[in-house]
Amino acid sequence: MRLLSLFISVFFVLSNLATAQEENPKDPRAKSILDRLSAENKKNEALYVKFAFHMVNKQDGIDEKQNGELWIKGDKYKLVLPGIERYSDGSTLWTFLTEDDECQITSVGNDEDETSFSPSQMLNIYEHGFNYTYEGKKKPNGVEVDQIKLFPEKGGKPYHSIILQVKSSSNQLYRLIVKGKDGNTYTYTLSEQSPNPEVSDAFFTLNTDDIGDVIDLRE
């Protein structure tokens, strides 16, 4: 779940890319694309994303696929995957295991589960900076993209590199590939993006009255 959290965090920090890059500019071509991506995302107060998740570890024979949906509004989000739903209103995080009819409730930023994250923790993806380089035009699934490879300047991350594929025609993120230090490769392909979906703040909370097992871990 930690690398999936990284995927979510990318959408929160894309609007902050320009500031981070100005402090430590790298490849000018890559920076130009990231600036446009940042500008595109700043237009949106909210975002809906449908994506395909693919995890591969050739050494361990792992090849897993699943589809998911993500809604983001400010520091709030809702994530839906097979068997799990996560809701966050910015202060409280609900993790609902649908098959087990179990929900865990934690305070955002106050739990010790490294797979959880608050908006401030999300910013860590760019807080310490990245080296990045432009890798040219690619055409995955017939979609023309500009590919940028990022490397964290400091250690301690669960990954050693991140690949962003940005649609050349629309400056939208098409694919995110995370190369994990555990040998796993996590690929997130965005099949649909809808800016500014009409969702209320209540959409990002979970009513637990009808859930069988509710574990409240808030202090």
Image: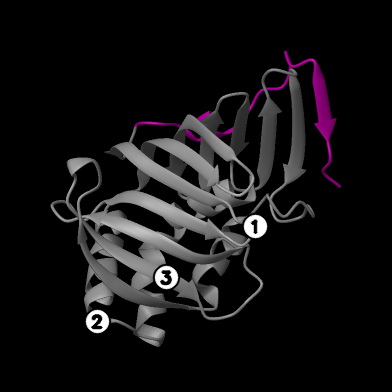
Quarter that holds the N terminus: top right
Residue furthest right as drawn:
219
What crowding class fits label 3: few (fewer than 14 Cα within 10 Å), some (14-19), or many (20 or more)? some
What secondary structure predominates along the stretch shown in magenta? loop
For the rendered model, the colour scheme is one colour
Query: Does residue 164 sit above or below 52 in this rendering?
Result: below
Residue drawn 70% across the image and 56% down it: 109
Percent coordinates x, y for residue 144 in the rendering: 17, 51
Residue 28: assigned label: 2
**Whole-Å distance between the Cαs marked 2 and 3?**
13 Å
Earlier along the polypeptide chain: callout 2 or callout 3? 2
What residue type is disc 1 on?
Asp
In magenta segment, residue 122 = no
Q: Which residue is mark 3?
A: 150
Earlier along the polypeptide chain: callout 1 or callout 2? 2
Pointer 3 and pointer 1: residues touching (CB < 8 Å)?
no
Between marks 1 and 2 in the image, the one whose residue lies nearer the viewer: 1
Residue 182: assigned label: 1
Residue drawn 59% across the image and 48% down it: 90
Query: Does 8 sit left or right of 90 as displayed?
Result: left
